[in-house]
Image (cartoon, rainbow, N blue to C red):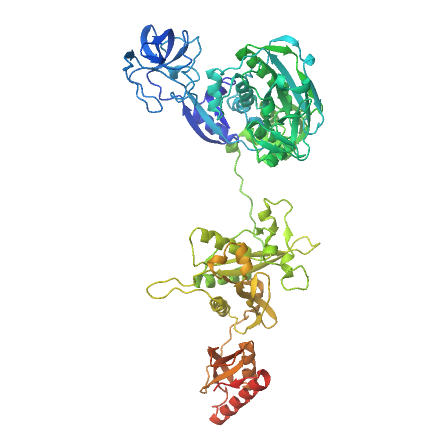
Amino acid sequence: MRVSLEWLKEYVEIPLTPKELVDALTMLGLEVEGQEELGTGLNKVVTARILEVKPHPNADRLKLCVVDVGGKEYQVVCGAPNVRKGLVSALALPGATLPNGMVIKEAKIRGELSFGMLAAEDELGLTDDHTGIIELSEDLQSGVELDTIKGIRDVVLDVSITPNRGDCNCVVGIAREVSFIVKSPLKLPSYDMLEEGEKIEKYAQIEIEDPEGCPRYCAGMIQGIQIRQGPFWMRYRIHKSGMRAINNIVDVTNYVMLELGQPLHAFDYHKIRGAKIVVKKAQEGERFQTLDGSQRLLSRDVLLICDGEGPVAVAGIMGGLNSEISESTNTVLLESAFFDPITIRKGSKHLGLQTEASYRFERRIDIGNVENALRRALELMRRLSGGVILKGTIDAYVKEFSPPTILLDLRRAESFVGMPLEREKVKEILSGFGMEVQGDGASLKVIPPTHRPDITIPEDVMEEIARGIGYENIPIHYPKISARKVWDTSLRRFSLRVKEVMAGLGFNEVITFSFISPVFLEIFKVPTDPSAPGHELRKIVRLKNPLSIEQSVMRTTLLPGLLNTVRYNLYQGVEGLKIFELGEVFFDQNQADLPDQRQHVAALVAQPFLRDSWYQKEREADIWDIKGVVETLLNAIGIREVRYEKARYPGFDPALTVDVYHGERWLLRLGRIERGVLKEFDLLERGDIYAFEGDVGALREARPRAIGFVELPKYPAATRDISIVLERDIESKRVEEVIKERGAGFVESLYLFDLYEGEKLEKGKKALGYRITFRSKERTLEGQEINELMERIISGLKENLGARLRE
């Protein structure tokens, strides 16, 4: 809300400097985000009265003007269409530098001397109007420096208004707050209007079919008006407030809205069919053309202002093209109404249209000020247009509003505010904010004014007390912290160890939102069959009041957040990402109060895995890279004996996905992200992405409880190499199981050193080369024993897997 300090001073005396006022308003809860000084840079610009206007002898469009500047007369050449005898305007004297950078000199224009320049409003930096030279009040003396005239030089404050303080979306609302600060009475503008016409009931009637959407609708009329440009003082204030001047009638509606916070709408009366106004909901699919020329598709969420035949305005948002004020308008029907904030918000959202009026209606205006604002506007219109106001107003107040009576417990208020409170001081503060206070005991009855509909419960009143005292004056109280038993920190220490290992492997930690979109269920193709792998991902916890659909459920996997992170970084040109996250996942437990909350760790590897440099060639990531990360992590936390099982799981490519177990305990899953998932995240063209996700709690339970000492071997080891041919789909782990079983406890280690699938083998076959290390803890193995073990191993591979030695 842009607030003119000069305008503000009309309603309250302000003995403070602009900086002091800014500080005081901010401490009262109205943060001032900035301030702007206007009307500066007008040195050598003075008021000038035009004494004579005659044609320029050498130019048809120019005039020779004789102007009076404080008793001195000068000739000025001017081409403005509004130049006329008797007009008081602004003359930029030779040597003046205007705000737009123009330097004024005495010059000859088409052979005639011009002593300076009669300036337009935009040339003076006052408004954006350039239709003619500025027209000032005829009461002003000539030769007065322009920036010394009241209202020209000003400071505009940019005040941030919170949604609950709709009463402060106007100059008078801010003036009320300033009045409390400086302890000076509030001087409200006059609402008296001169009514000389016939009774309004003869010309118009009001029907409200939707009292919920419109509890109060007032209307007044003025006849015999003339549409013209509004006076400079009004247009200047409107411009300073961030709005655009239109004409004297529309400007009045905007001026009163800025002044009193009451949006108004002026209809051309002769365009209102049937001489009546009907307030009702729109029909589903109905169309209406608004003032901006757009055809709007309406719904039942939209409230309409209709005449006897159809809509003429969208209530509280924008008028219609079929009833707008034009140059031919001579009679105005003026609307001042209270519209339900929720109704206006729904209509504005449906239409995708927010205006100055809808902004205020959505934040709730003062229902008690509706008729006063109407009278204020009608009187201003009469003064500026020469019209005649019809007697009376129509006030359809179909659903009256009564402010609540709030019981305030002073002891509870002391606890809330955090300091002792004197009853009389509390009553003084609340009365200063316009509230009626009754009672002299430990409890007070508080009735807020109609302009403060945000005050409905005792806590609201207590906040007003805190504001009145001054937040800076409330003493600081530190909470008492007593020693108590804390939760077991071993999981936290283990989590930190996992993070250290991942960071040591070159991964960057990220933190993503715990709230995600339920769309991931479809992207990951999570099965609906409860018995299918991955169905548990559907046990999502839905938020009751989500910020958006993209953050409406709690995550059951960390992968969507990591994939979004990869996409964002790739859009910024960051490639070769290696990221991980350690965070919570949540599973719904049906009727349980709280979800099943687990800690997971997940990591992603995007392309390329290695960048091209002087010591290495660029290389794409593959499944073995992510498997190597997992093995390093498991070894670092002490988990040695694991097994790998092929797996199918939502989001992972079934051809390259495995589950990792320690005994029967599932630890984690690793593999390639499924191509369909990458496509939905717009990552398909970026190459394969490999990932793993595991349960931190399971990893912690699987680690050894203690590290034991293993005696160094006393006896030498013997190694043998073996190369076998077998079916391609037989997993290497099965080969290792057979070798260890037939090795009779003497196989110390196995190492797969070769894999061949070339032309020299039959189709569907592969060759695996193993190095087997034998050792006994009790003696040195003889060569014959090792040969017998090898024979048993070869026999076992042939019998169990159909393998043969490679020739």
Q: Position of residue 176 (x, y in %)?
A: 55, 23
| Horizontal side of residue 59 vs 798, given as left or right | left
Any part of residue 65 in sight: no
Pick the front one: 215 or 488: 215
Image quadrant assignment for residue 148:
top left
Outermost residue toward the bottom in this view: 784
Q: Position of residue 498 (x, y in %)?
A: 50, 63
| Horizontal side of residue 131 vs 545, given as left or right | left
Tell me: residue 20, above or below residue 486: above
Tell me: residue 130, above or below residue 28: above
Q: Position of residue 158 (x, y in %)?
A: 47, 29
Image quadrant assignment for residue 434:
top right
Tell me: residue 509, above or below residue 277: below
Any part of residue 418 in sight: yes
Pick the front one: 276 or 578: 276
Tell me: residue 709, above or below residue 188: below
Pick the front one: 723 or 327: 327
Q: Residue at x 69, y 12 (%)?
A: 202
Q: Position of residue 782 (x, y in %)?
A: 47, 93
| Horizontal side of residue 74 vs 599, given as left or right | left
Q: How many marks?
A: 0
